[in-house]
Image (spheres, helix red, strand yellow):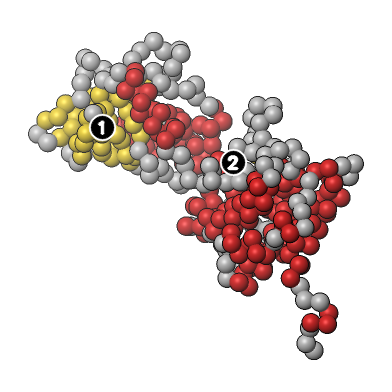
């Protein structure tokens, strides 16, 4: 039996599971792995989903463009006839077909395999392997769920903030979408679970994701209002928007109306107009005061001074007209403190 010798590795205990971590050449990994699909393969450790061909093709192209993976591949050694051997401080891995079951990285490995078929020299590059042995299906499922539920990928917007040079040409749309999704997913958000996400059940959500994205995207561009006032970071932009809607929510919550259908801000036209008002009028006022805190915003837009706007005032109006009514309502609150003509000095 031919072995791949790994002289440099780290042995660790992850929870109650023993593992070895090491670099391994791609050409040595590809012959030994296989994918055990849950519901199809009747073997221990079968937790994987059916492979997605489109995703594999995308990964192949990613690799052929000169990229490589910095996150690890988790393999479960299952061949009982040819076990992994630790001898003379060297890890010896048998080159046996289907000896290692993939726990995490199945699409990446399939993409690498296709890339190597087109460009064999890629096989000389290394990837990081986390190798465990003879996992039961519950243990394999525990690792799989930990990776795919507990460890969420960061929004692309955070990557853009850290590495500006990797921005795509449509990054401003990605930024708007990331903000909209966080408004939906953040338990502290005024719009928590209130945005209609693609594929969600009927009746779930009150404002369309596309409405929030379309309202924001013209302001998240380079040179837009956020960058104009040096609010370039994703987290800062989100905090401005969240604080602003949090103030509006506080007024309606006093009347028990925030989540009600009578609330105009729980509609596409109202939410769109509110974002437009924030970006066109309110951000500059907050910037003057050097504060985007809720208490500052509350002073600038005292909505409860002249009564709250309700949806019945938008009845029988077209979308554009509805947006204008909401926009003018917010703007009139902002202009309450504007001096009268005779108070100006010339």
Location of residue 249 with respect to 288 vertically, above or below: above
Does residue 223 show up? no
The residue pinned by badge 1 equals 15
Please give left or right for residue 59 compared with residue 208 in the image.
left
Towards the viewer: 5 or 205: 205
Q: Position of residue 159 (x, y in %)?
A: 49, 52
Towards the viewer: 301 or 291: 301
Split into 4 quadrants, where in the image is the C terminus? bottom right
Residue depicted at x 35% and y 38%: 72
Crowdedness near tag 1: few (<14), some (14–19) or many (≥20) residues, C-alpha within 10 Å: few
Towards the viewer: 19 or 268: 268
Whichever of callouts 2 and 1 sits on the residue coming sooner in the sequence is 1
Residue depicted at x 32% and y 28%: 75
Q: Position of residue 152 (x, y in %)?
A: 46, 39
Residue depicted at x 77% and y 54%: 307
Please give left or right for residue 134 compared with residue 212 in the image.
left
Please give left or right for residue 311 compared with residue 120 in the image.
right
Location of residue 80 with respect to 297 vertically, above or below: above
**Quick one: which residue is furthest to the left in this view?**
88
The residue pinned by badge 2 equals 192
Query: Hey, which quadrant is residue 119 in on the image?
Result: top left
**Quick one: which residue is furthest to the bottom in this view?**
346
Query: Hey, which quadrant is residue 329 in on the image?
Result: bottom right
**Quick one: which residue is furthest to the top in this view?**
42
Which is in the foreground here, disc 2 or disc 1?
2
Numbered label attached to residue 288: none
Location of residue 311 with respect to 281 vertically, above or below: above
Measured in 3D between alpha carbons, the distance from the residue under mark 2 to the one under mark 1, in whole angstroms, is: 34 Å
Split into 4 quadrants, where in the image is the N terminus? top left
């Amino acid at each position: 039996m031919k072995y791949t010798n790994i002289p440099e590795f780290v042995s660790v205990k992850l929870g109650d599971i023993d593992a070895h971590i090491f670099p391994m050449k791609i050409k040595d990994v590809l012959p030994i792995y296989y994918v055990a699909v849950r519901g199809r393969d009747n073997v221990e450790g079968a937790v994987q989903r059916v492979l997605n061909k489109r995703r594999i093709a995308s990964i192949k192209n990613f690799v052929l463009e000169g990229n490589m993976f910095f996150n690890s591949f988790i393999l479960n050694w299952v061949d009982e006839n040819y076990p992994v051997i630790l001898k003379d401080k060297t890890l010896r891995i048998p080159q046996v077909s289907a000896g290692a079951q993939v726990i995490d990285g199945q699409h990446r490995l399939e993409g690498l395999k296709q890339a190597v078929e087109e460009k064999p020299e890629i096989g000389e590059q290394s990837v990081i392997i986390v190798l465990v042995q003879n996992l039961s299906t519950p243990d394999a499922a525990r690792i799989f769920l930990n990776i795919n539920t507990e460890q969420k990928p960061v929004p692309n917007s955070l990557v853009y903030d850290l590495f500006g040079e990797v921005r795509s040409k449509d990054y401003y749309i990605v930024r708007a979408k990331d903000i909209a999704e966080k408004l939906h997913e953040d338990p502290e958000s005024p719009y928590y679970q209130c945005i209609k996400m693609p594929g969600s059940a009927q009746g779930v959500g009150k404002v369309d994701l596309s409405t929030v994205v379309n309202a924001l995207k013209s302001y998240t561009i380079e040179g837009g209002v956020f960058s104009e006032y040096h609010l370039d970071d994703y987290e800062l932009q989100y905090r401005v928007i969240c604080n602003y809607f949090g103030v509006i929510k506080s007024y309606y919550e006093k009347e028990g109306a925030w989540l009600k259908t009578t609330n105009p801000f729980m509609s596409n036209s109202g939410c769109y107009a509110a974002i437009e008002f924030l970006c066109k009028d309110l951000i500059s006022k907050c910037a003057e005061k050097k504060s985007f805190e809720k208490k500052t915003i509350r002073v600038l837009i005292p909505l409860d001074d002249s009564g709250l706007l309700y949806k019945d005032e938008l009845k029988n109006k077209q979308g554009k007209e509805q947006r204008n009514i909401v926009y003018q309502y917010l703007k009139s609150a902002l202009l309450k403190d504007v001096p009268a003509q005779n108070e100006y000095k010339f």
